[in-house]
């Protein structure tokens, strides 16, 4: 039997309230709490050597690091202070 009248409105209002509560909660949840497992983003199968890894899908990836100017312009001395 379908919902009618005030029963339907109460059900819709209850669902709406739950949805709003979830949105309100997600505003205050830090980004790192929302992140999933790293293996779902980069499915590493194995490491070939120190810097190269094989992916489960058949591709390869490489670990590297970059050095350069800090985008905020902070020097090493300022960071250490």
Image (tube, rainbow, N blue to C red):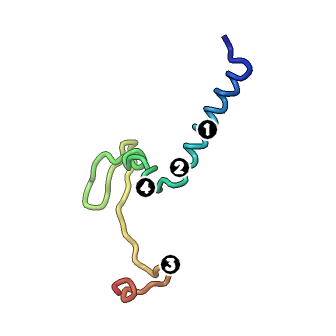
Residue for point 61% across, 43% down: 20
The disc, 4 or 1, on the residue closer to the chain's N-terminal end is 1
Which mark is nearer the camera, 2 or 4?
2
**Which of the pair 31/68 is nearer the observer?**
31
**Mark closer to the observer (2, 1):** 1
* Left or right of 70 on screen, residue 11: right
Looking at the figure, which quarter contains the N terminus? top right
Of residue 39 and residue 20, the one placed in the foreground of this image is 20
At numbered mark 3, what does the secondary structure look like: helix, strand or loop? loop
Residue 14 horizontal/vertical position (percent) = 61, 32
Q: Is residue 6 left or right of residue 27?
A: right
Looking at the image, do the residues carrying marks 3 and 2 touch, with CB atoms under 8 Å apart? no
Q: Distance between the residues labelled 3 and 4?
A: 22 Å
**Image point (30%, 61%), residue name:** 51
Please report whichever mark, 2 or 1, sits nearer to the chain's N-terminal start.
1
Mark 2 — residue? 26
Determine which residue is flagged by label 1.
17
Q: In this view, does 40 lie above or below 8?
A: below
Q: Distance between the residues labelled 3 and 1?
A: 43 Å
Q: How crowded is mark 3: few (under 14 residues within 10 Å), some or many (20 or more)?
A: few
Per the image, the residue denoted by label 4 is: 32
Quadrant for the C terminus in the image = bottom left
Closer to the chain start, of discs 2 and 4, is: 2
Q: Secondary structure beneath disc 1?
A: helix
Q: Mark 3 points at which residue?
A: 71
In this rendering, the label closer to the viewer, 4 or 1: 1
Q: In this view of the protein, which residue sits in the foreground, 38 or 56?
A: 38
* Image coordinates for residue 43, horizontal then vertical, percent: 37, 46
Query: In the current view of this chain or complex, which residue is farthest to the front?
Result: 6
């Amino acid at each position: 039997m379908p919902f009618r009248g005030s029963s339907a409105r109460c059900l819709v209002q209850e669902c709406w309230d739950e949805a709003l509560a979830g949105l309100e909660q997600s505003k205050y949840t830090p980004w790192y709490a929302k992140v999933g497992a790293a293996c779902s983003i980069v499915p590493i199968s194995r490491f070939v050597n120190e810097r190269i890894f094989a992916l489960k899908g058949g591709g390869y990836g490489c670990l590297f690091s970059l050095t350069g100017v800090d985008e905020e312009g902070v020097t090493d001395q300022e960071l250490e202070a």
